[in-house]
Amino acid sequence: MTRSGRSKWEIELNTWPRKIITITLSLGICGFIFYQTWWLFLAAWITRDGVPDPEIYERAVAYDPENADSRFTLAQIYNYSTEHLDLERARQQ
């Protein structure tokens, strides 16, 4: 500890350039994380009601192609639905 009671690793933000740099870095990191997770959130949001509509789940798979739950639900819709029966597309999912 130094004489002022602060650690030697602590960065003081007592000047405007340091504050602006810190705020810019924080917003940049938050923006990057938000951009990376936005598509996952959007895919989950459009399928939240559980309506067995293949158009909804096709959009969810387009937003998040790695989501196995959306693909499985879409395959079940194509395999078991009398209205949207398409065995080839069910196999693809």
Image: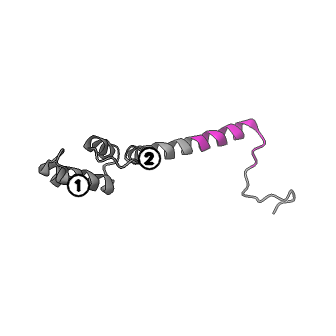
Residue 76 numbered tag: 1
Q: Tell me: 47 left or right of 26.
A: left
- Element under label 2? helix
Question: Which residue is the site of mark 2?
Answer: 41
Q: How is the image coloured?
A: one colour
Residue 13 appears left or right of 21:
right
In the image as oriented, which residue stretches furthest toward the bottom?
1
> Could you tell whether 35 is left or right of 1 in the image?
left
The quadrant the N terminus occupies is bottom right
Spot occupied by residue 48 in the image (x, y as percentages of width and height): 40, 48
The CA span between labels 2 and 1 is 22 Å
Task: State the image quarter where residue 3 is shown.
Answer: bottom right
Residue range highlighted in magenta:
12-27
Name the kind of residue labelled 2 in the image.
Phe
Residue 92 pos. (x, y %) = 17, 52
Seen at 27% across and 40% down, the residue is 55
Residue depicted at 72% across the width and 57% down the height: 9
Q: Residues within 10 Å of mark 2 (few under 14, many from 20)?
A: some
Q: Residue at x 66, y 43 (%)?
A: 22
Q: Amino acid at mark 1?
A: Gln
